[in-house]
Amino acid sequence: MEYTEIIYLISKTEKKDKIGNIIFVEEEKKIYAKKNKVGSKEFYNAAAVGITPTAELQIRISNYNNEEEVKYNNQKFSVIRTIPVGKSDLVLVLGIKQGIK
């Protein structure tokens, strides 16, 4: 399997606007990933805490900087869990919190 899926890791930076209010600015970093099948263990563990796991994407660990959100197929997902794969890869388990769009 090749790294053919385009995803965007979303980082948030806290800044102040012109009048001093704190705002969060999102920055997207484009990377490539491999799509994996969501395992039944991940599905049931996440469902137990109100999250629907949607995808597992394998990326190079060097691309990841603890981002909590990912844009994939024009939709935002939360990173539910990360799983190291060997020394150079990382699986991101993505999901959507139930009741939140």
Image (spheres, helix red, strand yellow):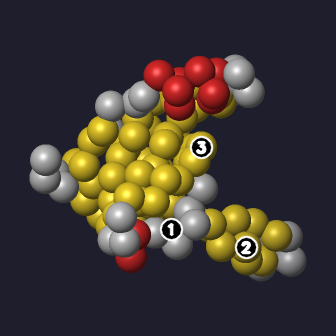
Q: How crowded is mark 2: few (under 14 residues within 10 Å), some or many (20 or more)?
A: few
Residue 76: in sight, yes or no?
no
Secondary element at image label 3 = strand
Q: Which residue is drawn at 25% across and 49% down?
A: 34
Q: How many labels does the image show?
A: 3
**Mark found first going from the N terminus, 1 or 3:** 1
Q: What amino acid is found at the position of numbered circle 2 in the picture?
A: Glu
Real-space CA distance between mark 1 and mark 3, rounded to the nearest whole angstrom? 20 Å
Residue bearing the label numbered 3: 80
The location of residue 3, given as percent across then percent down, is 18, 55
User: In the rendered image of this protein, does residue 41 appear above or below residue 32?
Assistant: above
The answer to which of 73 and 20 lies nearer the viewer is 73
Q: What amino acid is found at the position of numbered circle 3 in the picture?
A: Ile
Q: What amino acid is found at the position of numbered circle 1 in the picture?
A: Glu
The location of residue 49, given as percent across then percent down, is 74, 27
The answer to which of 15 and 40 lies nearer the viewer is 40
Q: Residue extending furthest right?
A: 20
Residue bearing the label numbered 2: 14
Q: Quadrant of the C terminus?
A: top right
User: In the rendered image of this protein, does residue 6 appear above or below residue 29?
Assistant: above
User: In the rendered image of this protein, does residue 7 appear above or below residue 18?
Assistant: above
The answer to which of 65 and 69 lies nearer the viewer is 65
Q: Residue at x 52, y 72 (%)?
A: 65
Residue bearing the label numbered 1: 27
Give the side of residue 71 with respect to residue 18, left or right.
left
Q: Residue extending furthest front?
A: 86
Give the side of residue 78 with respect to residue 99, left or right.
left
Give the side of residue 59 with respect to residue 40, left or right.
left
The location of residue 91, given as percent across then percent down, is 41, 52
Q: Foreground mark, 2 or 3? A: 3
Q: Residues within 10 Å of mark 1 (few under 14, many from 20)?
A: few
